[in-house]
Image (cartoon, coloured by chain):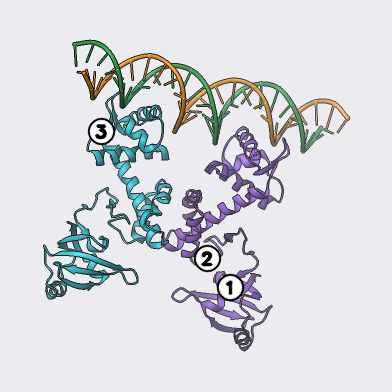
Chain colours: A purple, B cyan, C orange, D green
Amino acid sequence: MHLSATEENYLKVIYKIAEREKKSASTNTIAKYIGTAPASVTDMLKRLASKQLINYQKYRGVTLTTSGGKEATQLIRRHRLWEVFLATKLRFSWEAVHDIAEELEHIKSDELVNRLDAFLDYPKFDPHGDPIPNAQGKFTLRNQMALIDALPGNKVVLLGVREHETSFLEYLNGLNISLGTEFTVKAFNHFDKSMNILIDHNRETLLSEKVCQILLVKKI
Amino acid sequence: MHLSATEENYLKVIYKIAEREKKSASTNTIAKYIGTAPASVTDMLKRLASKQLINYQKYRGVTLTTSGGKEATQLIRRHRLWEVFLATKLRFSWEAVHDIAEELEHIKSDELVNRLDAFLDYPKFDPHGDPIPNAQGKFTLRNQMALIDALPGNKVVLLGVREHETSFLEYLNGLNISLGTEFTVKAFNHFDKSMNILIDHNRETLLSEKVCQILLVKKI
DNA sequence: CAAAAATTTTAGCCCAATCTAAAAATTAGT
DNA sequence: ACTAATTTTTAGATTGGGCTAAAATTTTTG
C-alpha cells in the first residue's frame, strides 16, 4: 500500500484520538489535530475509506480498520525510534526531538527502520516514556516495563522476569527480591547503566544493567 | 526560502548536469534525469526562475543562480552525510545507501544536519568517494582526500599530512614515506580500519586507521 | 418535541506537479 | 539557405490536497 505522508498523518491522528478518547474520531476533532478545515477532512476520509484503511459512515465518525491500524502502528514505531536516535545519538534535548521525528517518520523502508532499531539496541520506550512497538506492531505494555526504563524517583513493583535460569532466580532470592517487591529508583549510572535501588523502602543496593533489563515492573 | 522536495530535486539535477557536462542544462536532459516529460520541466523552470533560483531564457537552457547553487550544495551535503550514516552506522552496503539518502536529504533542519555531521566525525567523503561540502558549502577537493577514503586497488600519491608532530613525521621517515611517495591500496581491514599498502610499488606494510586519516593523497 | 445550535457534507473553486498533443523555435543536413 | 529533424514551449486536462460558502444532518435545549 503506497500512502502519502498526508494520508499517514490522518491515520496517526485517528489512532491517537481513538487511544485518548476511547471512541471513534469525529471530523471536527481530526480537523483540529491536523489543522485543516473540516471539509478537507471529509474529503480525506472518503479517500482513506476507499483504500479500506478506515471504517467510515457519513456523520458517524471513523475508526481504523485492521490494515489502517497496522499502518498507524508502524508510523508510531518509526517516529519513536527516530526520537530515540535524535536524543541519544545526536544529543537533541528531549523537547526538540518531536518536530524532526515528525518528518523522519515518513521515510518508509522496513530495512531502514529495522537496522535503526538494532543500532539503537531495540529500545522499548522513547524519550517521552511512550512505548515503541516492535517490528510486529506489539507494544511493550506501559504498565509492564523493564526496570532499566524507569527514571530516578520512580516507585515500581516487580511484576515478572524475562529470564528463568535457576542461577538467576537464586541470585534474586539472595537479594530477597520476589514478585511484588517494591523498588524506588535512586540513581541511574550512565557509565555502566547500573542503577541504585532502594528495595522495600529500607535496603539500598546496586543492580547491574543486565539485571535491570530482566526485571519487569509497573509504576506505583 | 521554502522549497518543496520536487523543486530541490530539480536544482540538484541542474547542478549535476552543469558539473558533469560543463554547460547549461537543457530541458530534455533535465527531463531524462528527473524522469518526467519535457513539458513538465518547462513549467518547473518557470517556477524556479520566478524564485530567482535559476537563470532561464526560453529555448536557451538554464544555469543556477548563486542562491540556487547554495540550495543545491546544501542538498548534496545532506545526501552525502546520510549516506555516510547509513553505511557506517547502520551497516548498509554502499550500493544500497543512495535510494534511502534520496529521501532523507529533503529533511531540512540545519541543526539536524550539523549534529549529524558532528556525530559522524565530520566526514569529508561519502561511501562512493564523493566529497561532502561543509556547512559553508565548501568542498574538500577531490584530488586531496585522506588515504583512509581510498578504495582497495586505488593508486595514490602523498600530497600532504594533517598532523605535524615531530614524532609522527619521524615515524613516516622510518617507513621511508614522504611527499610524492606512491601507494597502492591492497586491502582495507574492517575490524580495525587499518589498511594494507604497497609503497613505491615494492614494499608492503600495514598502516593504522589513525595514520590513514592523516595522510592526504590524490588518485593517480 | 420542535427549534436552535453544532457538526458534517456537498459544491465549486484553487494550486502544485504532472501528463499528452500540437505549435513554435532552434539546429542540422544537403 | 532551405528544408527536415530535433528540441522546447504552449494549451488544455488530470490528480492530490486544500479552501470557502452553503446545504444537510445530528444533537442539544427550552
Query: In the drawing, does residue D2 fall left or right of residue B40?
Result: left
At label 3, which amino acid type do we have? Ser
Q: B163 above or below B122?
A: below
- Residue B164 placement: quadrant: bottom left
A206 over C27 or under it: above or below = below
Please, what secondary structure does the residue beneath circle 2 have? Answer: loop
In space, the residues marked 1 and 3 are separated at their CA atoms by 62 Å
Q: Which of labels 1 and 2 is toward the front?
A: 2
Label 1 vs label 3, nearer the camera: 3
Give the crowd class for mark 2: few <14, some 14-19, many >=20 residues within 10 Å. some
Q: Nearer the viewer, residue A180 or B189?
A: B189
Could you tell me which residue is drawn at 56 percent across and 63 percent down?
A125
Question: Tag 1: Cα neighbours inside 10 Å, few (<14), some, or many (≥20)?
Answer: many
Locate residue B93, reporting x and y percent: 39, 59
Q: How many marks?
A: 3
**Residue, disc 2:** A122
The residue that appears at 40% across and 38% down in the rendered structure is B3
Q: Residue at x 31, y 31 (%)?
A: B52
The Cα atoms of the two marked residues, 1 and 2, are separated by 15 Å
Q: At which x and y percent is residue A73?
A: 60, 53
Residue A124 occupies quadrant: bottom right
Secondary structure at badge 1 equals helix
Residue D9 drawn above or below residue A14: above
Residue A180's place in the image compared with B42, above or below, is below
Chain containing the residue with disc 1:
A
Disc 3: which residue: B24
Estimate the spatial distance between the alpha carbons at disc 3 and disc 2, rounded to whole Å.
Answer: 49 Å
Q: Nearer the viewer, residue B86 or A170?
A: B86
What amino acid type should be assigned to the residue bearing mark 2? Tyr
**Residue beneath label 1, please?**
A147
Label 2 lies in what chain? A
